[in-house]
Amino acid sequence: MKTIYHHTSFIISAICVALMLVSCGKKQTPAGRPAFHSDSAYAYIEKQMSFGPRVPNSKAHMDCAVWLIEQLRAFGAEVELQKGFMPDYSGRNQQIYNIIGHFYTPETSARPRILLGAHYDTRPWCDEEELLSDRQYNVPGANDGASGVGVLMEVARQLGIKQASGEMATPVDIIFFDCEDMGTPQFYTGAEREDTWCLGSQLWATNYAKVASDQAKPVYQYGIVLDMVGAPDAIFPQEMYSTQYAANYQQQIWRAAEQLGHGAVFSSQPSYPITDDHYYVNSIAGIPCVDVIHYDMRNETGFPFWWHTRKDDLSNISKSTLQAVGEVVMSQL
């Protein structure tokens, strides 16, 4: 994450497409608010932070991966660990561990699924720090990483309850992507490879596309990726790759947010295209996927001032924002 492309013509055409398309899927008319507890989501973020920065292949990263697998199993998920290698910005192979939790009942196992995703790794370098001496530190990753995972862990807990009670209407796969934040650091001066961000989702999407003719391959209705979803002042605009590839579902989700009273957080304002895990789910796997990501128009980077710095800590997490995101996601399941 998180390359932003400033293409005016692309934005105008994408907005036109979004306006012309008619929304599909179910309408959000809940009898009550979707079941979601921000206290739990916050606790799951605290737990991730207790491991330390989850830099790929560090002890903290592996400890967090084991915890995620154990928790998903405790919630009743069938858990799959996808291993592989992807070249990083300098061409070195990085070990990837994608964690996938499958929630379904015997009655729903053959139905098209909904994919939910977030990355659980943290950036090895604080390359947005002003001081050169601070750029070699690991990003703590409370918001950039842990927040999306925390929300989806609470979603997983709720899905486990639905699964156990037989109330699940649609099967759901939750994917915790690895090595999302391994993109080229600003201080690197060597030859750069393309597509250096989102290595875990590239691996997953490529493997998914390779088995396109496999009848056992899961079929997805669409996907939602959560990234940086915990800040007190978070605004989630309509990201342009989501509009390009999954406009119907994007509009469906944002309407649900409005109906739940979260329209101030889920803004109808478009943002620039952002290279995040959803891009490769869309472009390689061919699954319509929407990115829910904090975009800050006040900053040149497009992201909060503490993005990719040592300040990405628990002070930047709001239970109110977690609740809004969690309710919106649960409204779609």
Image (cartoon, helix red, strand yellow):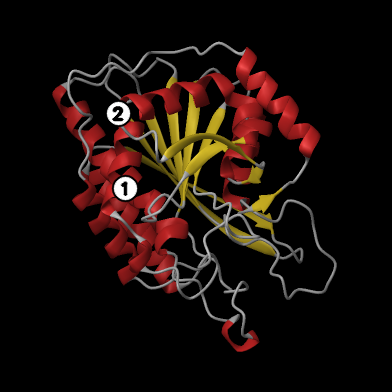
Instruction: Mark yes or no: residue 184 visible.
Output: yes
Q: Is the residue under label 2 in contact with that under label 1 (CB below 8 Å)?
A: no
Q: Position of residue 5 (x, y in %)?
A: 73, 46
Q: Nearer the viewer, residue 85 or 262?
A: 262
Graded by Cα atoms within 10 Å as few (under 14), some (14 to 19) or many (20 or more), the crowding at tag 1 reads: many
In the figure, residue 104 lies in which quadrant? top left
Q: Which residue is mark 2?
A: 260
| Residue 309 percent location from the top left of the image | 53, 72
Q: Which residue lies at the image location 24% right of the left edge and 19% below the top edge?
A: 30
301, 223: nearer the viewer:
301
Q: Amino acid at mark 2?
A: Leu
The N terminus: image quadrant = bottom right
Picture residue at 34% right of the left edge, 67% below the top: 315
Residue 290: x %, y % from top left: 53, 33
- The residue singled out by tag 1 in the image is 322
Which residue is more in the foreground, 76 or 42?
A: 42
Name the residue type under label 1: Leu
115 to the left or right of 43: right
* Comparing labels 1 and 2, the label whose residue is closer to the camera: 2
* The one of 43 and 233 positioned closer to us in this rendering: 233
Give the residue furthest to the right: 191
In the depicted structure, whether residue 184 falls above or below residue 106: below
Whole-angstrom CA distance, mark 1 to mark 2, is 14 Å
Q: Give the mark nearer the N terminus: 1 vs 2.
A: 2
* Residue at the far bottom in the pictured view: 133
- Eyeballing the image, is 319 above or below 61? above
Provide the secondary structure element on which disc 2 rests: loop
Residue 284 seen in this snapshot = no
Q: Where is residue 68 drawn, in percent x and y?
A: 33, 53
In this rendering, the answer to whether 93 lies above or below 282 is below
